[in-house]
Image (tube, rainbow, N blue to C red):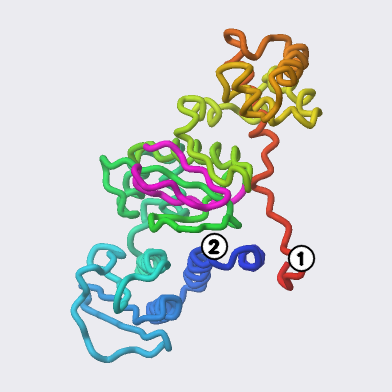
Amino acid sequence: MQELLGRISALDPEASLSLRVIACFDELVIGNVNTRALLSAAASLSGCTAGYHQDHPRRSMRVTPRGDVRPEEVLVPADAGSASEGLSVWLERDGAPHVNDAIILERLALAVRIRHGRGRRDLDNRRELGLLLDASVPVDDRRTAAARLGLAAGCRHRVVAAPLFAAWTDHPAGPQDVVPTPFGPIHAVVVPHDHPPVVASPAGTGVAGPVEQLHRSFRTALVALRLCLPPELPSVQADDYGGLVALLADTPADADLPDVDVLDTVMTHSWGGPTLDAVVRAGSVRQAARLAGVHHSTMQTRLDVIADVLGFDPFDGLGRSRVGMAYLVWRLRHSRVLDLPAPVRGNPMG
């Protein structure tokens, strides 16, 4: 993990900050450090005093960024985070919160809860977001995980998925974690359903749904992510594909789809990808020609080749649906967006 974080930092230092917070607290939990050490880590990461209070037995502690315990007692701030019933943590920040305060407080709360043996008795060792996004977990446990993450029942959210090396221009503040998937570890963030489009590259945003259905949002976010083509298409919204995105999410990777297999022949032509992309977006041959930036006669010649390969006219009846679905599945099967980019030449960490 540390090696991976080093490579991520070499690619995009800002994007890795929240992941470093997660990794830091993971190491502290594994090391079974005491509460003072957890508060010291939170204070050091945030640059301000971190506090903790428990009701029974009554006890409080505040630790400065230098690791010193502050002797004076203070009231629990109104905006303190709840680590568990009767257990609170907070950051004593003067002024507006910093960008990573939320993730630091979330990880501090989780670490303190584990340290004090509360909370996770009925769950396995995975994190709450991993439970919430796993359809095989009983729905009651998913609701419990959502509540622990502060996601209210009845509200709609959506999941943003990105690889660990993604570059975030504006990082959302919602619950987030690194979640294992068949495509490798993915950085998942939960945002409100009406959150503005996330500016990150690459990133996929899933469809909206209640907390019980966020596993579907995550699966559609993974489809959207794998349809990204940076830098031309750095992020994709699953909503743009309507019901198709759910079909794509449910299609097994090794499904027998003859229309997809024959597209390999079309893609051997340098014009294959841009032409098919224009065809599935256009309503006519002329419009497809404009989208592809070629003359109408050139597009017609290419369409004749495509029709010969496919065995049907991509602009005729069901042919439009067949070629559109086949093209999207082909892109998913050949997506390289999750491949770690090559380090920048001359970077000593590369």
Residue 111: quarter of image:
bottom left
Which amino acid, by three-letter code, is at mark 1?
Arg
- On the rendered structure, is 59 left or right of 215? left
Q: Quadrant of the N terminus?
A: bottom right
Residue name at image x 71 percent, y 20 percent: 299
Residue ID at (48%, 39%): 237
Horizontal and vertical percent position of residue 150: 30, 54
**Disc 2 vs disc 1: which is toward the camera?**
1
Q: Secondary structure at mark 2?
A: loop
Query: Which residue bears the numbered disc 2?
Result: 15
Q: Is residue 196 magenta?
A: yes
- Label 2–label 1 contact, CB within 8 A: no
Tag on residue 249?
A: none
Please state the horizontal and vertical placement of residue 335, each as a whole percent of the image.
Answer: 67, 39
Q: Is disc 2 surrounded by few (<14), some (14 to 19) or many (20+) residues within 10 Å?
A: many
Task: Please state which of residues 176 and 108 is positioned toward the viewer in this rendering.
Answer: 176
> Which residue is found at the position 27% from the left and 47% from the top?
152
Which residue type does callout 2 highlight? Answer: Ala
The answer for how far apart the CA atoms under marks 2 and 1 are is 19 Å
| Residue 312 is a magenta residue | no
Specify the segment rendered in magenta: 184-208
Residue 290 seen in the current view: yes
From the top left corner, tell me how far across and down residue 329 is, in percent: 63, 28
Please give the label number shown on residue 345: 1
Q: Residue, x 61% and y 8% (percent of image)?
A: 316
Image quarter where the C terminus lies is: bottom right
**Residue 23 spot, x, y in % from top left:** 53, 66
